[in-house]
């Protein structure tokens, strides 16, 4: 590739690190998803929805907030939640506050599935990343990914998933 109008090309070391990140994240998420699918017929995305709901008062949140928290489109979350509702993991209802918003709530069955799935998920996270990295490297990875998130949220504040 030639010089392109001010493009700051990656050097060989940066390119190798970037490709390692892309491949590692892809393989890691695929493995974590496969583990949950095999053991619980639950996708990694569905697991994350269960986690987010479990952490909220009343184990519920507005669908729009849930989509923002996961950094997914509202339509994607709506389709995922519909599958989860059919499986009895969550229920959806109109907001009692204004009747316009839709509230997604974790069912007792969904919470039970989450409790069991959490062991498999955490074991996978530990085995495939946490136990492979030194504590210093893991902290550095966290700092880098927080900087990436902070930068992207600053560019698109409506997508602040930390709320």
Image (cartoon, grey):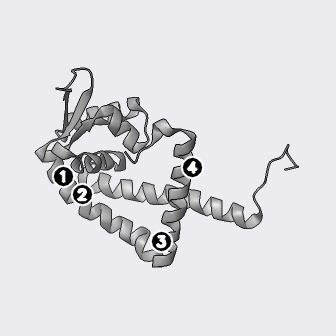
Image marks 4 and 1: residues in contact by CB distance under 8 Å: no
The answer to which of marks 3 and 2 sits earlier in the sequence is 2
Disc 3 vs disc 1: which is toward the camera?
Answer: 3
What is the CA distance from the residue labelled 4 to the residue labelled 3?
20 Å
Disc 2 vs disc 4: which is toward the camera?
Answer: 4
Q: Which residue is mark 2?
A: 117
Can you tell which mark lies on residue 113? 1
Disc 4 vs disc 1: which is toward the camera?
Answer: 4
Query: How far across and down, in percent of the image, does residue 116 sit?
Result: 19, 59
Q: Which residue is mark 3?
A: 138
What is the CA distance from the residue labelled 3 to the residue labelled 1?
29 Å
What is the CA distance from the residue labelled 3 to the residue labelled 2?
24 Å
Query: How far across and down, in percent of the image, does residue 9 sit?
Result: 78, 54
What is the CA distance from the residue labelled 4 to the residue labelled 1?
35 Å
The answer to which of marks 4 and 1 sits earlier in the sequence is 1
Image marks 4 and 3: residues in contact by CB distance under 8 Å: no
Query: How far across and down, in percent of the image, does residue 27 sit?
Result: 49, 59
Can you tell which mark lies on residue 151? 4
């Amino acid at each position: 590739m030639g010089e392109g109008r001010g493009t700051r090309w990656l050097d060989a070391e940066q390119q190798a690190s970037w490709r390692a990140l892309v491949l590692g994240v892809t393989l890691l998420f695929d493995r974590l998803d496969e583990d949950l699918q095999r053991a619980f017929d639950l996708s990694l995305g569905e697991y994350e929805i269960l986690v987010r709901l479990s952490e909220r008062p009343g184990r519920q949140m507005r669908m729009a907030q849930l989509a923002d928290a996961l950094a997914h489109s509202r339509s994607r979350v709506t389709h995922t939640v519909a599958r989860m509702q059919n499986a009895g993991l969550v229920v959806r209802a109109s907001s009692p506050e204004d009747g316009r918003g839709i509230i997604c709530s974790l069912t007792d069955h969904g919470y039970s599935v989450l409790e069991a799935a959490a062991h498999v998920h955490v074991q996978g996270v530990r085995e495939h990343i946490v136990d492979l990295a030194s504590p210093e490297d893991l902290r550095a990875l966290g700092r880098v990914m927080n900087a990436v998130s902070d930068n992207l949220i600053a560019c698109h504040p409506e997508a602040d998933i930390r709320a």
